[in-house]
Image: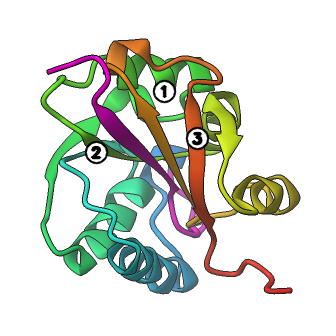
Amino acid sequence: MSVDVPRSIVLVRHAKADWPEVADHERPLADRGRKDAAAVGEWLATHGVAPGLTLCSTAVRTRETWKLTAPHLPHRPRTVYEERLYDASPGEIIAVINDVPEDVENLLVVAHNPGVQGVAEVLTGSSEGDSLERMQRNGFPTSAVAVLRFDGTWKSVEPGTATLTGYWAPHEPHE
């Protein structure tokens, strides 16, 4: 594939988790999280997001988020449960993205904060509309989604190389 292939990275923070007395990795979604995860899938489908690959943290809450999001998409992408995404820093998430096969044009990542928000902020070099302003104002609450576009190879993903083309969170205040 040519290095100037347009690609997208969709970053999804897991939905609202419950706090039972289990290890952090084993925390399930709360009732609100289950509803919000489905809403993420509806938003992605409505906005024409069609990932060819999903990389999902191995934590219970991220796997449940993806399980409830995926059925709303017109096409279910190949899914890889990636241990390196659990509690990953922005740099660690970018390293995982750099390993994506070049035949994938659209990638969806389901992971955790503060890493997901950090990646969205670090990769954004420009933005469309008010997406960046809203993301900066609202942060990256549970079930938030950022859509980034860039031209190049996965190995070329680095700070400032992407355009933030969309941002959404289920409970984002509408002004």
Residue count near mark 3 (Cα–Cα under 10 Å), binned few <14, some 14–19, many ≥20 = many
Residue 149 x %, y %: 46, 42
Q: Amino acid at mark 1?
A: Ile
Question: Eyeballing the image, is 120 above or below 65?
Answer: above
Do residues under tags 1 and 2 come within 8 Å of each other at their CB atoms? Answer: no
Residue count near mark 2 (Cα–Cα under 10 Å), binned few <14, some 14–19, many ≥20 = some
Residue 166 x %, y %: 57, 60
Residue 40 x %, y %: 45, 74
Q: Visible in this render: residue 114?
A: no
Task: Identify the residue under disc 2.
Answer: 106
Q: Residue at x 26, y 80 (%)?
A: 72
The magenta segment: 1-22
Q: Earlier in the sequence, mark 3 or mark 1?
A: 1
Depth check, mark 2 against mark 3: the one in front is 3
Of helix, strand and loop, which one carries label 1?
helix
Question: Eyeballing the image, is 147 above or below 150?
Answer: below
Depth check, mark 3 against mark 1: the one in front is 3
Q: Is residue 132 left or right of residue 100?
A: right
Q: Which label belongs to residue 163?
A: 3
Q: Residue at x 75, y 52 (%)?
A: 132
Q: Which label belongs to residue 93?
A: 1
